[in-house]
């Protein structure tokens, strides 16, 4: 139980294009999902908290117009990286909250912007 | 700001030995702690958690110890196996709903299991 999937697992795009990453909770409903970013050999940094049916809450320093988050259902949240640039290349990981404070993570999406 | 840190960035142990991974946290208000395992190119995998009203919790081959006095957390892995090789992160939160359930991750410790 508590499986979270992400799609795509890898994506390569050109500078200036937008990329959408999906996060799904497969066997449970999640009113709250989280989006993290991880650089090589570094820890996870929380980007934003995604709440079903409401606007996402962004962490300080994260551009909300750059990283668009939509949580339209209890099992799906999407992160769209708009006008991507090489510095946006990273490993993006989502998590879904099952109980009050337990998060289960997706397998991550490797984004490479050329 | 508040942070969670680890003492050892890399830990090398022999197969069959016990491993101990340490973590120091600085937010005295945190009351929920989790250990995650992350293999290369994958997302973090939940290992074990503990609440602040406990000082020890055991799982299958893993034990988490919490010392609130010195704000220290440790993960013990018994009879370490090659499949345990990964990066281990501790994380803390306030353990409540809403924004308080955000996790703050430590810097990670790489566990290398040698044959």
Image (tube, rainbow, N blue to C red):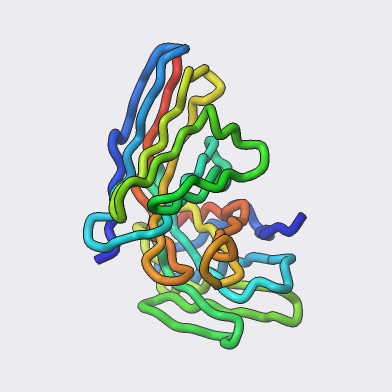
> Residue sitting at 45 percent across and 49 percent down?
A54
Of A29 and A113, nearer the camera is: A29
- Residue B106 sits in which quadrant? bottom right
Vertical order, A100 against A38 (above or below): below
**Residue positioned 59% across, 87% down in the render:** B53
Tell me where residue B56 appears, x and y as whole percent: 54, 85
State the image quarter where residue A2 is shown: bottom left
Q: Quadrant of the N terminus of chain A?
A: bottom left
In the depicted structure, whether residue A15 falls above or below residue B97: above
Q: Residue at x 57, y 55 (%)?
A: B109
- B1 to the left or right of A14: right
Where residue A61 sits in the image (x, y, percent)? 66, 37
Q: Position of residue A13 (x, y in %)?
A: 38, 17
- Residue at 65% in and 71% down: B30
Q: Quadrant of residue A80?
A: top left
Give A47 or B53, whichever is nearer the viewer: A47
């Amino acid at each position: 139980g508590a499986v979270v999937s992400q799609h795509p697992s890898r994506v390569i795009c050109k500078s200036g294009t937008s990329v959408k990453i999906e996060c799904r909770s497969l066997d449970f409903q999640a009113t709250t999902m989280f989006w993290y970013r991880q650089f090589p050999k570094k820890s996870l940094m929380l980007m934003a908290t995604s709440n079903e049916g409401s606007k996402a809450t962004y962490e300080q320093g994260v551009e909300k117009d750059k990283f668009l988050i939509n949580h339209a259902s209890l099992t799906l949240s999407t992160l769209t990286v708009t006008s991507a640039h090489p510095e946006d290349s990273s490993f993006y990981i989502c998590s879904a909250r099952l109980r009050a404070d337990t998060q289960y993570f997706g397998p991550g999406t490797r984004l490479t912007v050329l | 700001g508040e942070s969670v840190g680890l003492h050892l960035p890399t830990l090398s142990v022999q197969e069959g030995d016990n491993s101990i991974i340490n973590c120091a946290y600085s937010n005295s208000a945190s009351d929920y702690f989790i250990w995650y395992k992350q293999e290369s190119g994958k997302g973090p995998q939940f290992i074990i958690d503990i609440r602040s009203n406990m000082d020890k919790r055991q799982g299958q081959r893993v034990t988490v110890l919490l010392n609130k006095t010195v704000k220290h957390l440790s993960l013990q892995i018994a009879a370490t196996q090659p499949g345990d090789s990964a990066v281990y992160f501790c994380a803390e939160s306030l353990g409540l709903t809403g924004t308080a359930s955000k996790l703050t991750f430590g810097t990670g410790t790489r566990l290398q299991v040698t044959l």
